[in-house]
Every structure is written in structure tokens, then in C-alpha cells.
């Protein structure tokens, strides 16, 4: 299958949406995004449905378990399986979270990283290994966080340093940025201004849960609120309109 990148508005594909998306025109989405870990090795009816969708709309892949920020060796078997999946479905864009998610076993959550120069060097080397194996640029995503680890950099400087040293691309999650700006009291617009336009591949928007006035939890389970839409508009004004995808997991 010929590989394609994406344009326009996208939707995170969940299995509950498969039936509704089978008909042409059933969704206004220009592209779809899937977690490859949820689909590798899936055959039968579900596998055929995914293949049919990938022939009608471009796919992006958004990984869940690569553990870019961890200390354990990269899972090369998983990476080879991901590459085979990307090749089979014509996927050019593969993104992963800029976080840790394993330590002597899978943590099933995205752990924050220390924003340090040491972390930049270590993670950039892991990103380069991934890119070489996948034969594609890796797109790293800024993640939501609820605690901060010691480090000499702020989040924007850390993300920019990894992008530059690893020579990779960015998935700017606007909701995660908004959540962190509230949780850690920083200027989200200044963060956007610091980003290199040429490295922004696409964007995410989603909803979140208000635990408290100064604590937001990224859930993908609520409508996108007006301040997040406004921050998206600001990102467009600063960096140009990019492919943008809605994540919605429940409710």
C-alpha cells in the first residue's frame, strides 16, 4: 500500500466506531489515528474492517508503550512489529509520548520525565534508534503531568532540545499543554511561541476533568473546552494550520 501523510481534521479510531465508519461519508474525518499495539496481530472481521478503512482514509499511528523516557532497553521486537504494521497499512506518521511507561514491567501510565540536559541526551539517542529502525521520522508528543521531577530546564526548552538533538518531529497536544499550564502555572502561549514551526507535524485536541481549580486531569472523556479551542487558534496563528485530531475515549 502506498504511504500517505495526512491533512485536515482527524479522529482517534476506537473499535466502537468501526461499524459506523464503514460507510463512505459516515464521518467527516479526513484521517484516522490508531494505537498500533491495539491492532498488531488482529485479523478476522476487525482486521478486514481496519484494512478497508486504511484504503479509504490515511492512517496515523500513535504508540502507547515504547517507553522513550525509560531506562530499560528499547523493545526491538515491538519496534519490528510496529514497522511491519506501518508498512502494511501505508502509514507514514508514527507518534509516541515523551514520557516513561515501564520500569521492570509495564506501568500502564505515562510518567513525567526530569527536564534535564542529561535526559535530553539520553532520550534523543533512543529516538534516533527508533527512527533508524522504523525508517521514518518519529513524532514525539508532549504529555500531561501531575508532578514535576527536578531538572534545570522548563518543559518548552526540554521539548525543543529533544526535537533538535534527535532531529525528530512534534505532535503538539494542545489539551495536554493547557492542562500542564494550569497544573504548573506557566504561560501556554509562551510555550507555543518557543516551538520550532518546521518540526510540528500535527496536533491533538481533547477534553479533560477538572479535579480542582488548579488541577486538571487529561481524560479524553469530555468535550473540548473553549480555552483549549482558543489555544489551538493561537497555535494556528503562530505556526500555521496543521492537521488536527480529536481524541475521545468515553462519554
Image: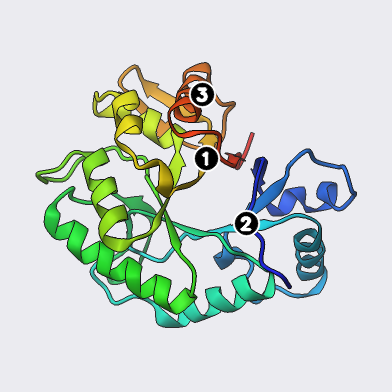
Q: Quadrant of residue 130?
A: bottom left
Q: What residue sits right under mark 2 in the picture? A: 5
Residue shown at the point (86%, 42%) measured from the top left: 26
Q: What residue sits right under mark 3 in the picture? A: 233
Look at discs 1 and 3 and give the one toward the viewer: 3
Tell me which numbered mark, 1 or 2, is placed earlier along the sequence: 2
Answer left or right for 127 relative to 218.
Answer: left
CA gap, disc 1 and disc 2:
16 Å
Tell me which numbered mark, 2 or 3, is placed earlier along the sequence: 2
Residue shown at the point (49%, 19%) measured from the top left: 230
Is the residue marked by circle 3 packed among few (<14), some (14-19), or many (20+) residues within 10 Å?
some
Is the residue marked by circle 2 packed among few (<14), some (14-19), or many (20+) residues within 10 Å?
some
Percent position (x, y) of residue 60?
Answer: 60, 57
Answer left or right for 151 relative to 243.
Answer: left
Q: Looking at the image, which is closer to me, 164 or 15? A: 164
Percent position (x, y) of residue 212?
Answer: 35, 20
Q: Secondary structure at mark 3?
A: helix
Q: Secondary structure at mark 1?
A: strand
CA gap, disc 2 and disc 3:
22 Å
Which image quarter holds the N terminus? bottom right
Q: What residue sits right under mark 1 in the picture? A: 204
Residue shown at the point (74%, 49%) measured from the top left: 16
Above-or-below relation of 132 to 102: below
Q: Looking at the image, which is closer to me, 168 or 153? A: 168
Q: Secondary structure at mark 2?
A: loop
Q: Quadrant of residue 28?
A: top right
Answer left or right for 109 relative to 72.
Answer: right
Amino acid at each position: 500500500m502506498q504511504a500517505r501523510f495526512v491533512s485536515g481534521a482527524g479522529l482517534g479510531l476506537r473499535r466502537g466506531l468501526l461499524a459506523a465508519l464503514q460507510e463512505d461519508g459516515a464521518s467527516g474525518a479526513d484521517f484516522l489515528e490508531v494505537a498500533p499495539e491495539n491492532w498488531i496481530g488482529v485479523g478476522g472481521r476487525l482486521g478486514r474492517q481496519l484494512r478497508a478503512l486504511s484504503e479509504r482514509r490515511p492512517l496515523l499511528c500513535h504508540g502507547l508503550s515504547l517507553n522513550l523516557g525509560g531506562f530499560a532497553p528499547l523493545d526491538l521486537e515491538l519496534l519490528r512489529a510496529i514497522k511491519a504494521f506501518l508498512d502494511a497499512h501505508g502509514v507514514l506518521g508514527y507518534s509516541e509520548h515523551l514520557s516513561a511507561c515501564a520500569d521492570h514491567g509495564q506501568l500502564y501510565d505515562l510518567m513525567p520525565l526530569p527536564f534535564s540536559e542529561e535526559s535530553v541526551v539520553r532520550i534523543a539517542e533512543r529516538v534516533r534508534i527508533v527512527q533508524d529502525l522504523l525508517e521514518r521520522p518519529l513524532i514525539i508528543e508532549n504529555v500531561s503531568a501531575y508532578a514535576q521531577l527536578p531538572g534545570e530546564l522548563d518543559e518548552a526548552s526540554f521539548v525543543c532540545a529533544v526535537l533538535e538533538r534527535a532531529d525528530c518531529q512534534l505532535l503538539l497536544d494542545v489539551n495536554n499543554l493547557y492542562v500542564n499550564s494550569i497544573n504548573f502555572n506557566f504561560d501556554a502561549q509562551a510555550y507555543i511561541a518557543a516551538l520550532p514551526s518546521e518540526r510540528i507535524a500535527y496536533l491533538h485536541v481533547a477534553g479533560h476533568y477538572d479535579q480542582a481549580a488548579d488541577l486538571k486531569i487529561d481524560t479524553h472523556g469530555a468535550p473540548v473546552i473553549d480555552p483549549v479551542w482558543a489555544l489551538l487558534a493561537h497555535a494556528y496563528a503562530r505556526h500555521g494550520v496543521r492537521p488536527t485530531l480529536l481524541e475521545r475515549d468515553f462519554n
